[in-house]
Amino acid sequence: MTAELRRHGLLVNHKKVQRLMNKMKLFDIVSKCWHKYSNYRNTQDPIKPDHIKRSFSVVYHNHKWYSDITEFKLNEQKTYLSPIIDGCTLLN
């Protein structure tokens, strides 16, 4: 609404417009384009062999290391996070 008023030459604060719209019980509708997740054209990487065999317990340091890669968008760019954990730190 504020952008439309500014296009018509009125210089108004967006907070004032929001306050007046709330008082008059007016709501704006913003449509967002959401894209369904796609697995890169339905391709799937081959499943890697399970070398750990679900045995996550270790006795000494630097015996087993675990990692995972997470991809997320940050400032319209793809960003990757890959933490690495020593298996010995998982013990209680």
Image (cartoon, grey):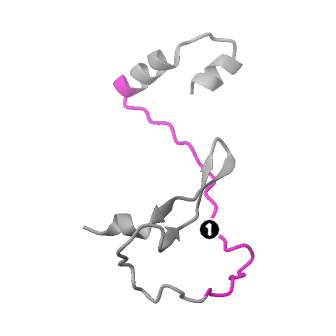
Q: Residue at x 75, y 76 (%)?
A: 41
Quadrant of the image occupied by residue 38: bottom right
Nearest to the observer: residue 8 or residue 72: 72
Mostly what secondary structure, the magenta segment? loop
Residue 25 part of the magenta-drawn span? yes
| In-front residue for pair 91/42 | 91
Question: In the figure, 8 relative to 35: above or below?
Answer: above
Residue 29 within the segment the image draws in magenta = yes
Foreground pick, 66 / 45:
66
Extreme residue in the right direction: 41
Query: Residue at 69% of width from left, 47% of height from top?
Result: 77
Secondary element type, mark 1 = loop
Q: Residue at x 58, y 47 (%)?
A: 31
* Residue 19, percent from left and from top: 40, 20
Image-based side of 65 in relation to 47, left or right: left
Q: Quadrant of the C terminus?
A: bottom left
Total labels drawn:
1
**Where does the magenta region start and end?**
22-48
Determine crowd level at label 1: few under 14, some 14-19, many 20+ residues with C-alpha closer than 10 A.
few
- Quadrant position of the N terminus in the picture: top right
Q: Position of residue 28 (x, y in %)?
A: 50, 37
The percent coordinates of residue 81 (x first, y second) are: 57, 55
In this figure, which residue is indicated by the disc labeled 1? 37
Q: Taking 41 as reference, is 22 above or below it?
A: above
Q: Mark 1 belongs to which amino acid?
A: Tyr
State whether residue 82 is above or below residue 77.
Answer: below
Residue 5 image-quadrant placement: top right
